[in-house]
Image: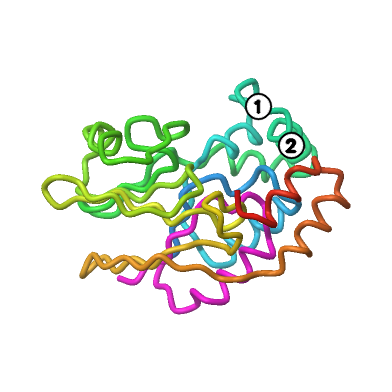
Amino acid sequence: MRVALLSDIHANLVALEAVLAEVGTAEEIWVMGDTVGYGPDPGDVLAALADHSARLVAGNHDRAVATGAGLELFNPAARAAAMLHREWLSGEERDALAALPLILTAGSEYTVCHGSPRDPLWEYVFDQRTAVAAMRSATTTHCCNGHTHVPAVIQLPGGGRMINPGSVGQPRDGDPRAAYAWLDTTTTAVELRRVAYDITTTQERIRRRGLPEVLADRLTHGF
């Protein structure tokens, strides 16, 4: 099965639309959390993913926007954006976010989560040592995760991997283009991809909607 892996869209509709235009041949779309937070278009992003029958798990920003949980752990800009998203989204949309699972499994091979199987909402996995420890909580060989906003495929002893497609809506690896990945679940092949999008349009929408300026500025440089 050919699966498109998306994560950390962060309410950036323009970036999401650029990615969706490239993944039209996907048999499934898996989204590793943080669909909302930071960006200008949370409702439209949720609707676009629903239109594509994407499978979503919860990220820490999704949970904060839905329920207020974890807001005290956010920096001021993230907290301000989450509070605005809580106002902008309908009660039905917030309920749908609150109902997102922390973990999905696809057969016996793939765990889908935001942080890690050990801590689905908050753990950052940047290296093999952390990945090995985190995967002890998994029931599958491989894991598709996000949260770091940095694309990576971390090899594990025994042949497993943690696959992070990076961030669609707010990259943090110095490349401002939207990041995503292709996964072939039959061959286990992974391809990390980037696609350019109209960053200026997203920045204008961030400012027009009254979100913190830093959330617009950082998109220029991808950090």
What's the residue at 73%, 45% (across, down)?
215
Residue found at x 44% / y 42%: 114
From the top left corner, tell me how far across and down residue 116 is, in percent: 36, 37
Q: Residues within 10 Å of mark 1 (few under 14, many from 20)?
A: some
Query: Residue tagged by mark 1?
Result: 68
Looking at the image, residue 200 lies above or below residue 41: below
Magenta region includes residue 9: yes
The front one of 119 and 214 is: 214
Do the numbered discs 1 and 2 sit on residues whose CB atoms are within 8 Å? yes
Label 2: element kind: helix
> With respect to residue 139, does 108 lie above or below?
below
Classify the position of the N terminus by image quarter: bottom left
Q: Residue placed farthest to the bottom in the image?
A: 25
Report x, y in % for residue 156: 20, 46
Q: Residues within 10 Å of mark 2 (few under 14, many from 20)?
A: some
Q: In which quarter of the image is residue 120?
A: top left
**Amino acid found under the numbered disc labelled 1:** Gly
* Residue type indicated by callout 2: Arg
Please provide the residue range marked out in magenta. 1-28
Q: Which of marks 1 and 2 is nearer the N terminus?
A: 1
Q: Nearer the viewer, residue 206 or 60?
A: 206
Q: In this view, does 62 lie above or below 217?
A: above
Q: Which mark is residue 28?
A: none
Q: Where is residue 54 in the image (x, y as percent from the top left)?
A: 49, 60
Marks 1 and 2 sit apart, C-alpha to C-alpha, by: 8 Å
In the visual, does 118 lie left or right of 97? left
Q: Circle 2 is placed at which residue position?
A: 86
- Image spot of residue 76 (x, y percent): 72, 28
- At horizontal 59% and vertical 53% (from top left) the residue drawn is 9
* Helix, strand or loop status at disc 1: loop
Please identify the residue farthest to the top as the structure is shown: 72
